[in-house]
Image (cartoon, grey):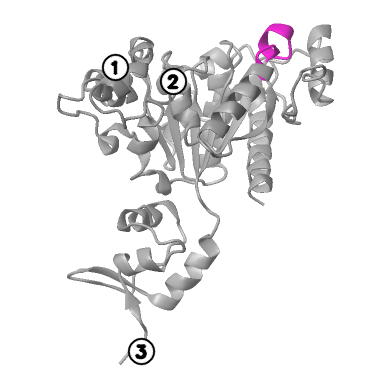
Amino acid sequence: MSSKKLVGISEIAEMADPPVTKQAVTNWRQRFDDFPKPVQSLQAGPVWDAEVIAEWLKAKAGHQPKVISFINLKGGVAKTTTSVAVAEILAKDFRKHVLFIDLDPQTNATINLIGEDEWGKRDADGRTLAQLFKDKLRPDSPCHFDIEKSIIRGVSTIDGGIARLDLLPSSIEFIDIQEKLPFVAMQGNYDNNPQDILRRALTSVIDRYDYVIIDCPPSLGIVTKNGLRFSTHYVIPAIPDIVSTWGIFQIVTSVDSFAESINRKIKPIGIVATKVQGNIDLHTRVLKDLREGRLFSGKDTDLKQPRLFESAIAQNANTARGADAEAGLNTFRKKYGPTYEPHLALTKEIIERCNQHRN
């Protein structure tokens, strides 16, 4: 007779340090390919070898999801294209489980990943993030948002969908909703923080993912703060010109102030130069200033300018076509053309910098 000690999901949850919920263990089984296989399945559920589980839990320590917001106060800086590319490459090339959250009311990332027709159906059915926030504005009415039904699995035009890439879609209704969100706490529940709506909704699913990528609106309003509220890091995409970089100081100081107010760190990973044109003197000059950290020179602050990523994304005339889900661009080479390698290199840098921050 075997002398192995067998444990179920409840016992595994208690073995974790710190202890977690049973739902967290269930999420780990979906997220981690190396989660041990059960020894057998009993009527009460699957059971595992306790020693094998103990070893796995030790190896897992420090593997909390990395939540990265992509932010710029100016539109048109390739923020969405960059964040989608990073998410697709993380999932496809690096085999990470990725949740992409589209908080931008323009819905460009959503349409890029699933197409306009599919988005229209889900928007009409209330299976977008707009429904989550609409529910909070009507506390006396039944809640319609369902996190499991709203997450779209295996999205992207590449290979007909990337198995490890999931999406929480946006809606143009955000335009009206974000103006009303400050009044959520006045709807009869003063404990309902309007900046904490998204984090609370994701509690049951976030442990399924290695990375969560958030495409934020071009503002620092409540919708963006819902993303920052549980972000571990953020990235600032910017064209190397005066107009696109002027708001970087405001972003860094505002995020730092917000992080202090919620008593947690939100670390800037860096600035990524986008739509770079090497034949423009202004781009060359601004890139040099960014590379040498001179953007904050003369500012009354102790904060440092985030580092510029080594990888820069050149201006590409086919970028708009690559964002069209109906264009039939089903490989990285077709979708991103000559910018695929820089996006791949950028993704590697993001992984490395996140790991440096963890250590």
**113 displayed left or right of 204:** right
Distance CA(mark 1)–CA(mark 3): 57 Å
The mark lying in front, picked from 2 and 1, is 2
Give the mark nearer the N terminus: 2 vs 3. Answer: 3
Which residue in the structure is indicated by mark 3? 3
Which residue in the structure is indicated by mark 2? 222
Asked whether 15 or 239 is in front, the reply is: 15
Q: Is residue 241 magenta?
A: yes
* Vertical relation: 3 (above or below) 82: below
Three-letter code, disc 2: Ile
Which residue in the structure is indicated by mark 1? 120
Residue at 80 percent of width and 8 percent of height: 282
The location of residue 42, given as percent across then percent down, is: 21, 72
Q: Residues within 10 Å of mark 3 (few under 14, many from 20)?
A: few
Where is residue 192, by image quadrant?
top left
Q: Residues within 10 Å of mark 1 (few under 14, many from 20)?
A: some
Three-letter code, disc 1: Gly
The location of residue 31, given as percent across then percent down, is: 42, 51
